[in-house]
Image (tube, rainbow, N blue to C red):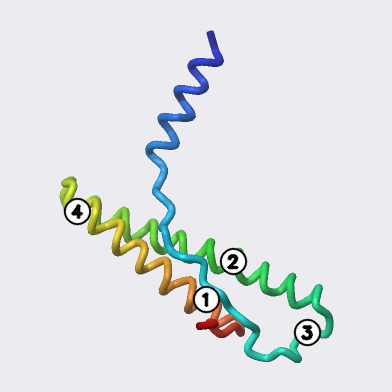
Amino acid sequence: MLRPFLIAMVLALSACAPSAPTVPDMQFALADPGKYKTGAERDRALLTAKLDCKTKALAASAAIEKSIAGERHSMENLSRAREQAAEMYAASFTLCMTNAGYVQKS
């Protein structure tokens, strides 16, 4: 009896969660290759920077999506909010990675 209730609760809560922006994974390279001595240090620094920047970018995109969607609750605003959130995510992520010492590969 409790299991169907928990499944329904998880589904309901996941429907309320902000959607993750669908931004293609951007590739970055270390601006100063001599900064780290070993490959493991470079990999760890890249992973740390990516995780930190994804967190910051997701928070920024969720904030803008919430503010735009809250203006007037209509489908038009929701789609505009998602577009703006995706743009904010990409811009925030790129800026954060640049500040962390990485350059974007083309």
Q: Earlier in the sequence, mark 3 or mark 1?
A: 3
Say what amino acid the circle numbered 4 marks: Asn
Q: Position of residue 37 (x, y in %)?
A: 83, 85
State how far apart marks 3 and 4 are (Cα). 46 Å
Residue 23 occupies quadrant: bottom left
* Number of residues whose C-alpha sits closer than 10 Å to that of mark 3, classed few (under 14), some (14–19) or many (20 or more): few
Question: Label 4 belongs to which residue?
Answer: 77
Question: Label 3 belongs to which residue?
Answer: 36
Say what amino acid the circle numbered 3 marks: Tyr
* Label 3 close to label 4 by CB (< 8 Å): no
State how far apart marks 2 and 3 are (Cα). 19 Å
Q: Position of residue 31 (x, y in %)?
A: 63, 89
Question: Label 2 belongs to which residue?
Answer: 52
Q: Earlier in the sequence, mark 2 or mark 3?
A: 3
9 and 102: which one is in front? 102
Q: Residue at x 24, y 51 (%)?
A: 78
55 and 41: which one is in front? 41
In the picture as drawn, the residue positioned furthest to the top comes out as 1
Question: Label 1 belongs to which residue?
Answer: 96
